[in-house]
Image (cartoon, rainbow, N blue to C red):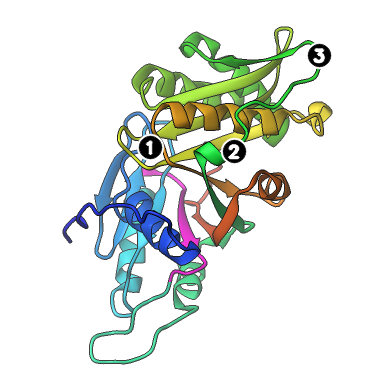
Amino acid sequence: MDTPPRVAAPATPSPDELRAYYDLRMRRQARPDGPGAVVERVGGSLRQTGGPDGWDGVVWSGLDVGEADAVIAAHVAHFAALGRSFEWKLYGHDRLRPAAGRSGEDADGLAARLRAAGFVAEPAESLMVVEADRLPHRVPLPAGMRLHRLTGPDEADLVAEVHQAAFGDDRTRIRAWVCALLADRPAGSAVLVVLDGDRPLSAGRLEWDEGGEFAGLWGGGTVPAARGLGLYRALVAERARIAVERGVRWVQVDATDRSRPILDRLGFRTLTTTIPYVWTPPASTASRPG
């Protein structure tokens, strides 16, 4: 399957036009999102095999009814051979196309096929997007706190400490992944923390492609004791400022129920939902950075 041609972004897109453009640029034309990652097409789908501590999953699918089961099986076989769990990001507007010569569409067929293949649905998230220059670029922090942008792999423990406290993530794995990101993609990412003295309380990262229209806000989290102080909003604002500085037009978030109300108030709009369907090999407890 050929790579879709590059097209210009709509000047003032409607929500449906922006969603279609997002699908094209960030899903059908997705690039590796971290150190050592490889993106490849399998039938009418696109998957990423991450580096040692990166994200593994299917980022886009435009499957028809006739090929769906075979493509799902191919992805399962690929990651089973690697001994890795992986995520199939199923968006709310994804549909299976009818088989050749037939009409109609199979609206719920892909989700049902994923469940039949052993995938387990995780809580739904909202794909939220806003133009970066419409966001506030500074949110005051409580007295004694400051924003800090990580300058090298030696500071990765700051993020790992936040993720362990906020999400229960494996600290060693997160540290290794952040180290690799800072070493291999310094020109396409920014990793930030909010510090109270030397203690990290909140963290988040911004990732973009050179010349791209979208940048992703990822990994935003705050330790439980510091929630409600505006730290997450401050991290969103600083990352939006960096995005504008880099020439990025839109920033996007896969928002949980916890962060969606904050992002609504900041001006983000919901384009669709996404449900992570996760397949895990037997006896595997591997986790991947979000």
Q: Amino acid at mark 1?
A: Asp
Q: CA distance from mark 2 to mark 3?
A: 23 Å
Q: Residue at x 62, y 33 (%)?
A: 136
Q: Which residue is mark 1?
A: 33
Q: Amino acid at mark 2?
A: Leu
Q: Nearer the viewer, residue 204 or 106?
A: 204
Which is more N-terminal, label 1 or label 3? 1
Measured as percent of width and height from the top left, residue 150 is found at 52, 15
Q: Residues within 10 Å of mark 2 (few under 14, many from 20)?
A: many
Relative placement, left or right, of 185 versus 44 is right
Q: Residue furthest left?
A: 2
Q: Residue at x 47, y 63 (%)?
A: 14
Q: Residue furthest front?
A: 12
Task: Classify mark 1: helix, strand or loop.
Answer: loop
For residue 168, which quarter of the picture? top right
For residue 113, above or below residue 72: below
Relative placement, left or right, of 122 versus 280 is right
For residue 94, above or below residue 191: below
Q: Which residues are magenta?
A: 81-94
Measured as percent of width and height from the top left, residue 257 is found at 70, 52
Q: Which residue is mark 2?
A: 135
